[in-house]
Amino acid sequence: MSIRYLTAKIAQQIDEELMNATGAFSLDQLMELAGLACAQTLAKVYSKEKFPRVLVCCGPGNQGGDGLVAARHLGMFGYEPTIYMPKPGSKDIYKRLQTQCANMQIPTIPPSNDIEPLRTALRSTDVILDAIFGFSFQPPIRTPFDAVLPLLDESKLPIVSVDIPSGWNVEKGNDLGVGLNPDVLISLTAPKEGVRKFKGRHFLGGRFVPKEMEEKYQLNLPQYPGFDQIVELPSESSQKL
Amino acid sequence: MSIRYLTAKIAQQIDEELMNATGAFSLDQLMELAGLACAQTLAKVYSKEKFPRVLVCCGPGNQGGDGLVAARHLGMFGYEPTIYMPKPGSKDIYKRLQTQCANMQIPTIPPSNDIEPLRTALRSTDVILDAIFGFSFQPPIRTPFDAVLPLLDESKLPIVSVDIPSGWNVEKGNDLGVGLNPDVLISLTAPKEGVRKFKGRHFLGGRFVPKEMEEKYQLNLPQYPGFDQIVELPSESSQKL
């Protein structure tokens, strides 16, 4: 049985069930484990010796929250992260996560629609963590992200995307061609329909799905090695064999 | 510079600072990372092949919460944990953590002052995770724990203690001789004064202390390897060399 790729609707449903009274998880818990998995994936592929400067690009939603948690852990691992979050979300949790990063002396580029500061930051970046849009993204891409995505893409820097590459349709992939082209993808909980044909290195994180839920949704998750929080999925080409 | 061993007062102060408006961490976050570190420590020393059945013994406070998080992660790692929590704490978070474990089909021995069920459980246990008392423990040991600790000790099963072995004085160690004698210890944030002479394998977890706080309290924490959440400390004997 191969792993299940989720539609937006099922992904949303699983998220809700994890956090309702039955699932009993708090957003703080899930975000902490998700963000840790993102940081570990980046660290697994891009060493801090060769790629110390990480630009963590965060959107205004929960995806951005995962990015903030990842930024903090990357700081703990010895990287030099910088946060780019042009439209900070209003939820209290994002503010707390930002404070935690500030306490780690992780700089944040001041929020703005002007993309010049991003252009400047990219010149001193070794790798990008893309935590801009998640599985609830709907086009059109709003300002300033309509200018941000092409800039990240043109930078030719390596990109690690969280859950779904920003600008991609959760189910149809990069059908409009406006999305990022990441080198590495870290799917959370289970991969989404849209990344079925993703060609880069693909990891899975979010080792918190109870067996019962996994069976209910027939997720067929792979076995995580030992006590790791991430597992690498076979590449698209090897799946075909 | 060697690592700092904390007094109860300093340990309490650091905990408070992590969670006040300046530190900005939620209990959910810290407990998640602490419990994960506990589970990983147990998994590092006792393989699930040889030691699948873990009895996770939880006290009524935050230490017990760490235990519940660890039990869930151990379930995720493929162990067969059982929870023994004779006096469940009343905080909402403990209830949520217990529900998360129940969703993982992790059994809990029904709360009671009767220690017979514990005696029975120990007969089908391979390793004990001791998350009963933490750094705010003050003697005397109350019922049923006054009977629980000797029973755990007499079982001769391997014991992994969280932060401070249960029954030990946070600063003076096992001075009254009523505490457990664990084989492995996982200190959280920084080790406590009382475990200075601990002879077993000693790990540190809680990779969330911002550099500024580490310096303020002169913690001299060791470097965690790579993106691990635990680090093994040199044994007491090797520190003397």
Image (cartoon, coloured by chain):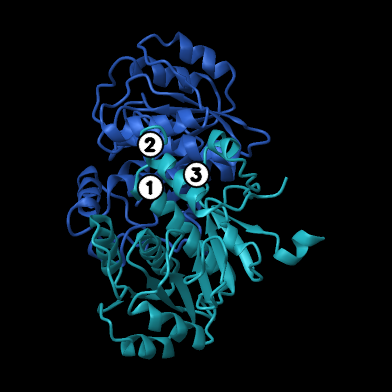
Chain colours: A cyan, B blue
> Where does label 2 land, which residue?
A24
Name the kind of residue labelled 3 in the image.
Phe
Q: Which residue is mark 1?
A: A29
The image quadrant of residue B158 is top right
According to the picture, the residue beneath numbered tag 3 turns out to be A208
Q: Chain of mark 1?
A: A
Question: In this rendering, which labeled residue sits more in front, label 1 or label 2?
Answer: 2
In what element is the residue under mark 2? loop
Q: CA distance from mark 1 to mark 2?
A: 10 Å
Q: Secondary structure at mark 1?
A: helix
Report if the CB atoms under discs 3 and 1 are less than 8 Å apart: yes
Relative vertical location of residue B166 with respect to residue B23 in this rendering, above or below: above
Which image quadrant is residue B4 in?
bottom left
Residue displayed at 33% across by 80% down: A144
Chain letter of disc 2?
Answer: A
Percent position of residue B106, x then y: 51, 27
Quick check: A52 left or right of A99? Answer: right
Q: Are marks 1 and 2 on the same chain?
A: yes
* Pointer 1 with pointer 2, Cβ within 8 A: no
**Neighbourhood count class around disc 1 (C-alpha, 10 Å): few under 14, some 14–19, many 20 upward:** some
Q: Quadrant of residue A198?
A: bottom right
Residue at the spot x=29%, y=38% of the render?
B135
Q: What amino acid type should be assigned to the residue bearing mark 1? A: Gln
Residue drawn at x 54%, y 79% as measured from the top left? A158
- Asked whether, in this view, residue B214 is left or right of residue B67, the answer is left
For the N terminus of chain A, the quadrant is top right
**Is residue A27 visible to the viewer in this orientation of the structure?**
yes
Residue B20's x, y, as percent?
Answer: 18, 53
